[in-house]
Amino acid sequence: MKRIIIAAAALFAAISAIADDFDEAARGIAGANPQVAASRARYEARLEEGRAANVLAGPEVDFDYKFAPSGVENRWGISVGQSFDWPGAYAARRKANGYRAEAFAQLYRAEFVEKALEAKQLLIAIAESRKQLELLRAASMNMTRLAEAYETAFAQGETTMLEVSKIRLRRFEIENRLAKAEIEDEQLLNNLRALNGGAGCPEVPELPLTAHLRSLEEYRQELEDNDPGAAANRRLEAAALADVSAARRSALPSFKLAYVHDYEEGFHFNGFSVGISLPLWGPRASVKAARAEAMAQIQDTGDYSVRVNARLLNDYRLCSRLDSRVDAARRLFADDAYPAQLRKALDAGLITLFEYLSEYGSYLDAKSEYYTLCGELAQAWASLERFSLLP
């Protein structure tokens, strides 16, 4: 029992180390991704637009000059004034901008996580591709050695041309699969370079052959506590409601205060003026638009919650099923002695060459499918554990 516990602890430590390697590489790629950087700049620009709309208009300077009839001195006047909205409007806009700033920060984190997840899953795909290449290269070398042995035996009259041809056909099939796998691996690397902003590729960790799946309730709690998309929607909803308040206050009268200086008939006059603007038509439409925008954001928040919970459930069910299938297959390929056993049986004459090639082909297909399952499991698990990628 003690040995089982120690082995389980060692396996968990190995899984955690591999996951950390993938996470570190994925975060680095997301940080270098141009789309993520562009999103951050766009959010900052939108935030500055909101702040710019909540400052006082520039002061207004008016000058007038009146020409008098002959014999009467001309008159002139100057005024310097400042217009401002109803005072509560500025506070409401400032509150909305504050919520929006928090929302944009969370939206950036959400985009970072999704891009890091994309990078992590691409790294997993490359790690799986490396395993497939390793398998096919070993198979190609095995077929090359077998072909050389049978070519020699045929030259010595110890085998038939039919057997030599059969080996050649199987060798061509494996080398063709290897060539296709190498092309796919190169394409994955090119995609990773593009995701990394055109820079070189980071070191790709080993493909994890298992996952440490937690309970569904733990993942639900993690989603509730850490999802930046949900946090952003809550802030955007609060900002939209604050925009409604700001629109209402903007419908109230605005004011203009000005210092006035006039010169008439040889006298200088100093004073002030007060102006009131009475918005009658536009503000009603602005309030209606703000309410509609708030309602739309509330609907978006609800829709997002439904979608992310559905995604969580789908990922969890897929990961659970793949984990059980991989667990069973892992024991099958634990020692990987089957190819050597087949070769011994062939050399001892216990099976024919055709039986060997058929069994070896079945082995290659089965192990390739095993690596595919491991890759699918790792990708599904990465989606479940995506909040470990938060900046």
Image: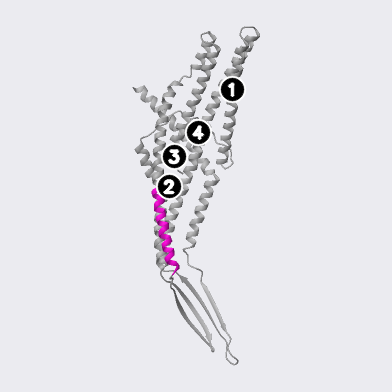
Q: Earlier in the sequence, mark 2 or mark 1?
A: 1
Q: Which residue is mark 1?
A: 173
Q: Which residue is mark 4?
A: 124
Q: Residues within 10 Å of mark 1 (few under 14, many from 20)?
A: few
Q: What type is the residue that disc 1 sits on? A: Glu
Q: Which residues are magenta?
A: 281-302
In space, the residues marked 1 and 3 are separated at their CA atoms by 39 Å
Magenta span: chief secondary structure: helix
Q: What type is the residue that disc 3 sits on? A: Arg
Residue, x 47% and y 81% (percent of image)? 271
Q: Earlier in the sequence, mark 2 or mark 4?
A: 4
Q: Is residue 10 above or below residue 199?
A: above
Residue, x 44% and y 58% (percent of image)? 97
In space, the residues marked 4 and 3 are separated at their CA atoms by 14 Å
**Residue 1 located left or right of residue 349:** left
- Circles 4 and 3, Cβ within 8 Å, touching? The answer is no
Task: Residue 127: say if magenta.
Answer: no
Query: Percent x, y for residue 248?
Result: 40, 65
Q: What type is the residue that disc 2 sits on? A: Gly
Q: Which residue is mark 2?
A: 229
Residue sticking out furthest to the top: 157
User: Looking at the image, which is closer to me, 91 or 9?
Assistant: 91
Q: Quadrant of residue 147?
A: top right
- Circles 2 and 1, Cβ within 8 Å, touching? The answer is no
In space, the residues marked 2 and 3 are separated at their CA atoms by 13 Å
Quadrant of the rendering where the N terminus is positioned? top left
In space, the residues marked 4 and 1 are separated at their CA atoms by 26 Å
